[in-house]
Image: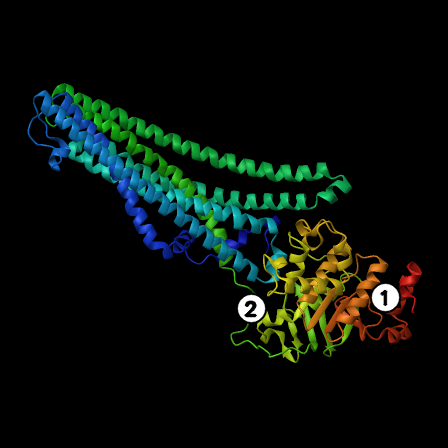
Amino acid sequence: MSDEHGGFKHVRENVDGHPIRNLLGYARPYWLRLVVGVVASFCTRFARLVPPIVVAAAINRVVLQSGEPGLLASLGLLPGHGITGQAARHALLERLVVIAVLAYLVRSVARFASRYLLQSTAQKVQRDLRDDTYDHLQHLSMDFFVNHQTGGMMSILNSDINRLEKFLNTEFRQLIRVVATVGGIGVVLWLYSPKLALIALAPVPIIGVASGRFLTWIEPRYKSIRETVARLNTRLENNLGGAAVIKAFNRYGFERERVAEQSQTYHDEKVGALRIRRAFFAGLRLLTGVVFVLVLYVGGSDIVAGAPGALSAGAFALFFLYLRRLYSPMRRVGKSANKYQLAKSSAERVFGLLGRTPTITSPEDPYVPAAVDGRVTFDDATFGYDDQPVLTDVSLDVPAGATVGLAGTSGAGKSTLLKLIPRFHDVDAGAVRVDGVDVRDYDLETLRESVAVVEQNPYLFSGTIAENIAYGDRELLREEWEADAETREAVVEAAEAAEADAFIGNLPEGYDTLVGERGVKLSGGQRQRVAIARALLNDPEIIVFDEATSDVDTETEELIQESIDRLIEDRTAFVIAHRLSTIRDADRIVVMADGEIVETGTHDELLAADRGYAALWEAQAEDDPASTTVE
């Protein structure tokens, strides 16, 4: 089922397993880098705990000359006895400086290692995931592309996968930060004062529960936001691609309203999520502020009263240095929960797309012929889109090497019928056979390499004319094709056969001329001749011309027709034509109406029958007498 304006809502239903677990599965091949990166990240966090301990020791043992040994003395890094005398205090200070320097050195090296390894791994996962998603998308059947728009696909390949990379890059390190910082600080604070440690750590479970609730609140909103973004992207892409039509019909206001409506929807959803997010973070800050005040009051009261177990001045300072570091990652838990939900929403779309299986694939034991002759048989072929019939019981037997012209009004089913040959779609009933073998039994790549299609509005890739022609032969498709004389010769020969060489030679850069996006720099007739050259370079056994001369003038049509006549001599050819003059010399002409064959025969036979074809021929003769004149 398609989604309105490319939202891809139903793609989520194809996710197999938890989407974030699937994402982490892409990191499994890089486990060694991850292990080293995680260890280095923990070392970074633990090293950051050392300077406050050094400060506490300096206050107690160097400044105040307290006899309290402290944590460093318990670890054997400082002498446990009291320090007196200026020289001894100075020596103790130097030792503390060395400990601090070593801590900062470890932190710097470990930080570089952790960030480099974890971030580069995130980039590798992003690359692999985008490659797999694009490859899977390319192998999906045409019905998927019919029901889903390009803007939504681009949103998944770019926005969603980039968001997953950022999640792995940032939030994975934040998780380590929370575990290492909260765990390390909790242990140190407990060693100094269990009572104050309990007060300081009290918000931890509260923040954990609140974060879980936050995920529940925000999840549906972020799903809706991602779908809205896809629809907005699709609308923008449609309008930018149709800029000429908008200008021609002066529909600026109409399109602005449509974009503004979807933009407003996106704004409202984002503001709604922002309200919840800001309220959540404000609550966390209030909670940590309350704990800060409690530690200040309880700890300060114990010191003033001289209570047993009261903190020393250095330890009291240590508590507040740690409190700031403790709640910073804890507050970040809320942001991480927010990022997690965004990533989960994106992962559902990405892995939902990856979980969608093509409807048209090669069979388990495909038929791979040594050669294809080109005989095509339609045997009671029936097909429809979404339960709307397009073809009904179409039967036609075309010998190898024959040329068949197809005529009929728009919507008669001509193009759809020929799309069944390379299995762009599969019949709902009946069969389509090539050389007597059902196309569903063929290896899909072998079948499609035997069939070339030149469409009414051919698609050219952004690049040079030569690259677009060379696309017809996988052996010739190389970046530096111009450096290969043999490749250039093959491209030029195909262009000459398609009557394209003349106009290409008149372009400023010749075959190196950039065609622009979708070939926008070329005229319709020029694009079609380039597309014909591309198809011819593929050297197919079966060739389909779908209104291939519809956008060319009469003179150019005659030139192309002459080249087509030479080139289809040993191939099975299907020619869909609006101008009947294009197909009057075909071996057989098939007339279709409402998805059925209503007439078949040669040009002369159909004229003699004096039915629909004859009437259409006569009408075209009145409009353009030159096109129907028999020489």
| Quarter of the view holding residue 391 | bottom right
Question: Label 1's element?
Answer: helix
Question: Is residue 514 shown to the viewer in this render?
Answer: yes
Q: Which residue is mark 2?
A: 361
Q: CA distance from mark 1 to mark 2?
A: 38 Å
Please report the residue visible at 47 percent of the width from the left and 34 percent of the height from the top.
274
Q: Nearer the viewer, mark 1 or mark 2?
A: 1
Question: Is residue 13 shown to the viewer in this render?
Answer: no
Within 10 Å of disc 1 (Cα), the crowding (few <14, some 14-19, many 20+) is many
Instruction: State the image coordinates of residue 2 (x, y, percent, origin top left).
Output: 59, 55
Within 10 Å of disc 2 (Cα), the crowding (few <14, some 14-19, many 20+) is some
Q: Which residue is mark 1?
A: 581
Instruction: State the image coordinates of residue 275 (x, y, percent, origin top left).
Output: 47, 33
Among all residues in the image, which is located at the extreme left? 81
Q: Which quarter of the rendered picture does the N terminus lie within?
A: bottom right
- Along the line of sight, which residue is nearer the eye, 460 or 386? 460
- What scheme was used to colour the molecule? rainbow
Q: State left or right for residue 477 relative to residue 173.
A: right
In the image, residue 627 above or below residue 41: below
- Along the line of sight, which residue is nearer the eye, 426 or 209? 426
Q: Are marks 1 and 2 in contact (CB under 8 Å)?
A: no
Question: Label 2's element?
Answer: loop
Amino acid type indicated by mark 1: Ser
Amino acid type indicated by mark 2: Thr
